[in-house]
Amino acid sequence: MILFLALCFVATAIAGFCAFVIFWPLTLVHVRDRHSDLRAEFGDGAFLKPDALRWLLSGRYRETRDPSLTGLATPARLSLLTIFFGLVMAALLWLWSLI
């Protein structure tokens, strides 16, 4: 039963990944088109750059005061947090099953 729940958390992480793959590129396109200062800060190919992901996780997108950017970045942030949560919980349950 514990391993089944761990597998359910892996499925949750996969669902978070699917949402991340949808919303994060849309956020980056919005940044590219409307916020040249942020684009210069991230550089090209910012999809998995640590600086861009740190910017997303810290919620610094709210500093721009752009409701469209916030509307795209918030689901991307939540989906990234869902990935981390799902994988951590699956790992903890897997470790628990070893005991």
Image (cartoon, rainbow, N blue to C red):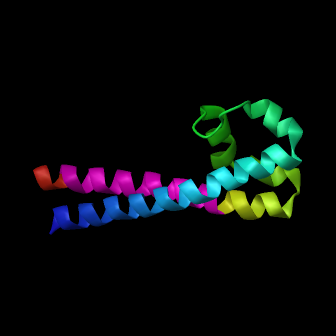
Q: Residue furthest left?
A: 99
- Foreground pick, 57 / 29: 29
Q: Is residue 33 left or right of residue 86?
A: right
Asked whether residue 80 is drawn in magenta, I would say: yes
Q: Work out whether residue 99 can be spotted.
A: no
Asked whether residue 48 is drawn in magenta, I would say: no
Residue at 80% of width from left, 37% of height from top? 39
Q: Position of residue 54 (x, y in %)?
A: 64, 40
Q: Is residue 84 left or right of residue 35?
A: left
- Foreground pick, 11 / 89: 11
Q: Position of residue 8 (x, y in %)?
A: 29, 66
Is residue 38 shown above or below 56? Answer: above
Q: Quadrant of the N terminus?
A: bottom left
Q: Is residue 82 left or right of residue 41?
A: left
The segment highlighted magenta reads: 75-95
Residue at 43% of width from left, 56% of height from top? 85
